[in-house]
């Protein structure tokens, strides 16, 4: 299945792109409205881009009243990305979403600024959310966690149903002339093709550590990239940065992936999931 990465597609501006997906994931919603960071918020850089949007969103109340009913009209299954700064706030947003028939799953964005990446903290949040939610819960982790497989095991034990891997990595871009940071907030989240090997390693290691269903993302721009994420252990893939330059990416990547699978004699994406973990053939010298 092909998802968008949270924050990388405005479904109201480009509903036809959202409809080309199997699942639409919202931008992260927080308990209260957030204006986001000061401009400049986006900078193109080598092999990807930096962003420092800062979780700009209207807050859960306005999201439920104004955005969710319109998103439901898309007719695409909806996942809501939830962010906060304390486990009780995550739980509150999850509770507010629990009765909505439009929300299929919740993606807990555990990679927000000021949210500790330590396994205890991530698992505390998942645990609190689990108590308030009957929805499927996916934990979205940062590839910068000190011990990512350990964090993955901790959120699994706390009640997560799956993992979303990965969020951006902190990066910096300097202006050619002034040598000052190009982003208003100085550093930002690095995404795009340069993130792919890091994201693949995260998927590979967490699949091995937990066996959980994984939505894989990080620099996917072709069907070949998608195939590699499946082989590393992803059950589904998400498109992020590529959507800014190629809005037709969902359909294109879907076709390219089908060709990649067929050329290997595979008929479904499920058959590709985890192939990188198969025992290596023994070669005799
Ligand atoms: C402009 C922009 C905004 C983003 N906003 C969010 C967000 O609100 N919540 C979130 O969990 N991830 C957010 N992300 C991270 C993406 O969902 C994704 O994890 C990351 O970009 C890696 O995938 P990619 O390399 O395909 O872009 C954002 C990324 C970008 C580029």
Image (cartoon, rainbow, N blue to C red):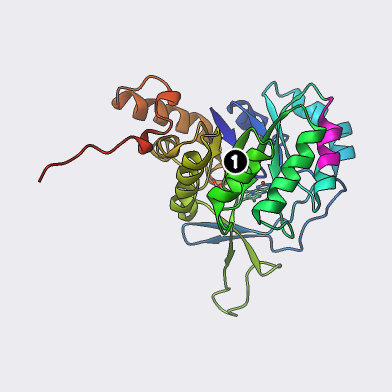
Where residue 234 sits: x, y (%)? 49, 35
Q: Please tell me which residue is depicted at 79% across the width and 49% down the height of the picture.
A: 84
Q: Crowdedness of circle 1 by 10 Å Cα count: few (<14), some, many (20+)? A: many
Tag 1 secondary structure: strand
Q: Please tell me which residue is depicted at 57% across the width and 73% down the height of the picture.
A: 174
Residue 203 at least partly seen: yes
Instruction: Determine which residue is flagged by label 1.
Output: 164
Where residue 265 sits: x, y (%)? 30, 22
Q: Is mark 1 within 8 Å of ligand 1?
A: yes
Give the quarter of the image for residue 231: top left
Viewer-nearest residue: 139 or 63 = 139
In the rendered structure, the answer to whether residue 251 lies left or right of residue 88 reads left
Q: Please tell me which residue is depicted at 82% across the width and 55% down the height of the picture.
A: 35
| Residue 93 within the segment the image draws in magenta | yes
Q: Please tell me which residue is depicted at 59% across the width and 26% down the height of the picture.
A: 22
**Which residue in the rendered view is the most extreme toward the left?**
285
Predominant secondary structure, magenta span: helix
Viewer-nearest residue: 163 or 236 = 163
Magenta segment, which residues?
91-99
Give the quarter of the image for residue 232: top left
| Residue 108 within the segment the image draws in magenta | no
Residue 111 at least partly seen: no
**Which residue in the rendered view is the most extreme toward the bottom?**
178
């Amino acid at each position: 299945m092909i998802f968008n990465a949270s924050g990388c597609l405005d479904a109201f501006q480009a509903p036809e792109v959202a409809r080309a997906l199997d699942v639409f994931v919202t931008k992260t919603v927080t308990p209260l409205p957030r204006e986001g960071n000061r401009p400049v918020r986006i900078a193109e850089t080598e092999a990807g881009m930096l962003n420092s949007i800062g979780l700009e969103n209207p807050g859960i109340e306005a999201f439920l009243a104004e955005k969710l009913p319109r998103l439901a009209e898309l007719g695409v299954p909806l996942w809501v990305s939830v962010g906060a700064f304390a486990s009780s706030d995550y739980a509150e947003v999850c509770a507010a979403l629990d009765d909505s028939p439009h929300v299929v799953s919740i993606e807990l964005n555990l990679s927000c600024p000021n949210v500790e990446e330590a396994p205890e903290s991530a698992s505390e949040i998942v645990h609190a959310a689990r108590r308030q939610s009957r929805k499927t819960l996916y934990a979205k982790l940062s590839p910068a966690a000190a011990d990512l497989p350990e964090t993955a095991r901790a959120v699994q034990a706390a009640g997560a149903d799956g993992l979303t891997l990965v969020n951006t990595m902190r990066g910096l871009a300097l202006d050619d002339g002034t040598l000052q940071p190009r982003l208003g907030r100085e550093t930002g989240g690095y995404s795009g093709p340069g993130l792919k090997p890091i994201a693949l390693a995260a998927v590979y290691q967490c699949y091995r550590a937990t066996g959980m269903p994984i939505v894989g993302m990080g620099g996917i721009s072709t069907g070949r990239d998608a195939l590699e994420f499946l082989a590393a252990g992803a059950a589904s893939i998400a498109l992020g940065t590529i959507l800014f330059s190629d809005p037709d990416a969902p359909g294109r990547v879907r076709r390219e992936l089908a060709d990649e699978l067929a050329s290997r004699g595979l008929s479904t994406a499920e058959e590709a999931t985890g192939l990188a973990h198969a025992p290596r053939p023994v070669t005799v010298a």
